[in-house]
Image (cartoon, helix red, strand yellow):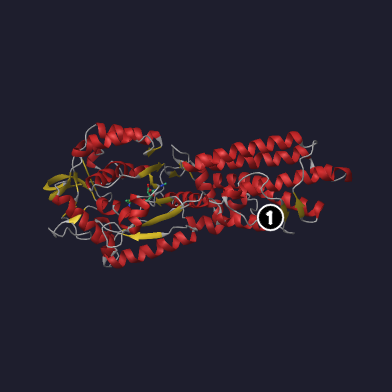
């Protein structure tokens, strides 16, 4: 049987900004989702990339004394290698300055123009250069500032092309109504619905005030608005409007799942403009949208001016990559913002990784070595451990199911919590069954075997489920346990019948001392 397909995308990152731990979240979270989908048996394509056009980038390039293309080349290289450093398993990295993308966007724009979904008009309004957006008077902040970033807006008047949003208003509302899972979580869906219900205005989709963008072939003094250009990446990458659109057919038109993950700040673009573009192009909407919150610092948003920016490689160098990936995925709730402070990071690291997981691995392996010379086999459940075994197996089966359900709907925090319910109980299981006491009585050898087998099986299952979040650490644990089948097909208690564990496991997570960390790094956030 052919595998089901799953196409997962992050937003393409602006080539003007830097990636800090806040905005690295979208890519790390998607990576966890993509790894999960691969394990769940999907033929998965995971795409990320760069959003390279627009006035902001044109101005930044000028300031740097570079041609825009050279400027974005440099940033794209840096960003692509950052994703490698963060162990991001993306299959594709699209850049909106690639020829194939430019040509495909020009074609789709001309098509929409020819069929009158785009028309020529005139626009006058308050424009925010940083956000590449026009705002109506009612949307503006004090002193005509941008409601999103707070910068002063400029009055810009220009001949412009417009995309008919109004025409599709009702159709989009119907679509959202008929597809309750289209925008998740529900709170974000409700925001979108109430925004549309206030009435949509046609969207200005071209600019004449700068040059660094995709030209409109039939009227080259205009460049295409960056959001039209950028949103189209999700299909141009697959070959839409090119002479090789096999992947577009496979992963979009005939695909089983298409998932866009975005931060809450760009919800409207993805939940309104993008589906309307697709409807106008006569293409199926196909995707599901997951909008996540923001990673905040204790003093609010991360920003250079506040001096509170934390970079992922700094955290990686100090504490390792997997703890960072784990922390971000665990800290971001489904509907709210998440928090990053070093205090909290260190606390979570100590509680969940060093204590709960790390200890479970080292204690279990040490006992198998000490009492059974490193090899243990499945045995019949013993009556002495009966209650504890039943409780453990129940907790495992309930939480495995929860984990799978949560991961399916991109609830990563809940997914991790389900795994740690199991880890937490496994530690308690050791106290309940007291293997060190069993070991004192040769007549209880079977009971001891039963107990340690239960522990290793639990660890094996936990490790399988943790793979999307901590790919390196889980590989180490598998090696230490001598487990080679890492697939979801083996995600059932009792599937593995024999273990030969490593003699000396490494310390996976060394406990951290906050005071020491303060001394070393002068951590303030
Ligand atoms: N270029 C647009 C996306 C175009 S997609 C067709 C863009 N780029 S971005 O670089 O500004 O943002 C990339 C991702 O980072 C977005 O999902 C954005 O919501 C997210 N985040 C930016 N700051 C964030 C935090 N502090 N926390 C979590 N995610 C945040 O938007």
Determine the residue located farthest toward the front in the rendered image. Answer: 1
The total of numbered circles placed on residues is 1
* Residue 500 sits in quarter: bottom right
Q: Residue at x 80, y 36 (%)?
A: 384
- Give the percent coordinates (x, y) of residue 284: 30, 45
The reply, left or right, for residue 240 in relation to residue 46 is left
Q: Does the residue tagged 1 have its C-beta within 8 Å of any atom of ligand 1?
A: no
Asked whether 464 or 152 is in front, the reply is: 464
Relative horizontal placement of residue 108, taking residue 233 as reference (left or right): left
Residue pictured at 54% horizontal, 56% vertical? 321
Left or right of residue 412: residue 160:
left
The image shows residue 65, relative to residue 50, as above or below, that is: below
Q: Is residue 68 visible?
A: yes
Where 390 sits versus 495, above or below? above
Q: Position of residue 240 (x, y in %)?
A: 29, 56
**Crowd band around label 1 with a 10 angstrom C-alpha radius: few (<14), some (14–19), many (20+):** many
Residue 387 in the image, given as x and y percentages of width and height: 74, 33
Going 72% across and 54% down the picture, which residue do you hit? 499
Q: Position of residue 69 (x, y in %)?
A: 28, 66
Left or right side of 484 for 63: left
Q: Which residue is mark 1?
A: 481
Q: Quadrant of residue 184?
A: top left
Above or below for 390 versus 348: above
184 and 322: which is toward the camera:
184
Q: Can the viewer see residue 523 in this picture?
A: no
Residue found 50% across the figure and 46% down from its top: 329
* Circle 1: element type: helix
Q: Nearer the viewer, residue 15 or 206?
A: 206
């Amino acid at each position: 049987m052919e595998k089901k397909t799953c196409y997962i995308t992050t937003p393409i990152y602006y080539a003007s900004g830097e990636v800090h731990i806040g905005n690295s979240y979208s890519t790390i979270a998607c990576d966890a989702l993509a790894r999960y989908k691969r394990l769940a048996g999907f033929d998965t394509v995971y795409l990320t990339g760069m959003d390279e056009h627009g006035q902001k980038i044109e101005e930044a390039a000028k300031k740097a004394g570079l041609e825009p293309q050279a400027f974005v080349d440099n940033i794209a290289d840096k960003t692509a290698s950052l994703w490698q450093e963060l162990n991001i398993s993306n299959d594709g990295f699209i850049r909106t300055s690639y020829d194939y993308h430019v040509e495909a966007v020009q074609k789709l724009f001309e098509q929409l123009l020819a069929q009158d979904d785009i028309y020529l008009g005139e626009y006058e309004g308050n424009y925010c250069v940083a956000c590449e957006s026009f705002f109506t008077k009612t949307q503006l902040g004090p002193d005509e500032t941008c409601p999103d970033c707070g910068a002063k807006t400029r009055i810009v008047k220009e001949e412009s092309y417009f995309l008919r949003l109004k025409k599709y208003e009702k159709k989009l509302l119907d679509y959202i109504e008929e597809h309750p899972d289209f925008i998740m979580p529900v709170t974000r869906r409700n925001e979108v619905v109430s925004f549309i219900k206030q009435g949509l205005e046609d969207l200005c989709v071209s600019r004449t005030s700068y040059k660094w963008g995709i030209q409109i072939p039939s009227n080259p003094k205009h460049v295409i608005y960056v959001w039209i250009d950028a949103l189209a990446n999700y299909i141009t990458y697959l070959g839409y409007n090119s002479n090789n659109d096999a992947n577009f057919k496979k992963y979009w038109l005939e695909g089983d799942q298409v998932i866009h993950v975005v931060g809450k700040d760009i919800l409207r673009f993805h939940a309104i403009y993008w589906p309307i573009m697709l409807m106008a192009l006569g293409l199926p909407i196909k995707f599901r949208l997951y909008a996540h919150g923001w990673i905040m610092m204790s003093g609010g948003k991360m920003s250079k001016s506040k001096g509170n920016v934390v970079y992922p490689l700094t955290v990686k160098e100090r504490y390792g990559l997997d703890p960072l990936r784990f922390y971000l995925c665990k800290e971001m709730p489904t509907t709210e913002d998440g928090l990053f402070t070093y205090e909290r990071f260190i606390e979570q690291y100590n509680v969940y990784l060093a204590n709960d997981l790390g200890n479970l691995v080292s204690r279990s392996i040490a006992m198998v070595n000490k009492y059974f010379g490193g090899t243990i086999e499945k045995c019949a459940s013993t009556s002495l451990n009966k209650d504890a075994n039943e409780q453990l197996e129940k907790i495992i089966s309930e939480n495995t199911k929860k984990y799978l359900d949560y991961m399916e709907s991109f609830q990563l925090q809940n997914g991790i919590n389900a795994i740690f319910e199991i880890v937490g109980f496994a530690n308690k299981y050791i106290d309940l069954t007291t293997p060190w006491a069993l070991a004192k009585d040769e007549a209880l050898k079977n009971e001891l075997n039963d107990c340690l087998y239960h522990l290793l099986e639990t660890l094996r299952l936990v490790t399988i489920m943790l793979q999307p979040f901590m790919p390196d650490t889980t590989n180490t644990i598998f090696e230490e346990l001598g487990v080679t089948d890492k697939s979801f097909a083996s995600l059932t208690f009792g599937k593995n019948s024999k273990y030969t564990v490593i003699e000396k496991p490494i310390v996976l997570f060394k406990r951290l001392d906050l005071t020491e960390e303060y001394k070393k790094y002068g951590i303030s956030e």
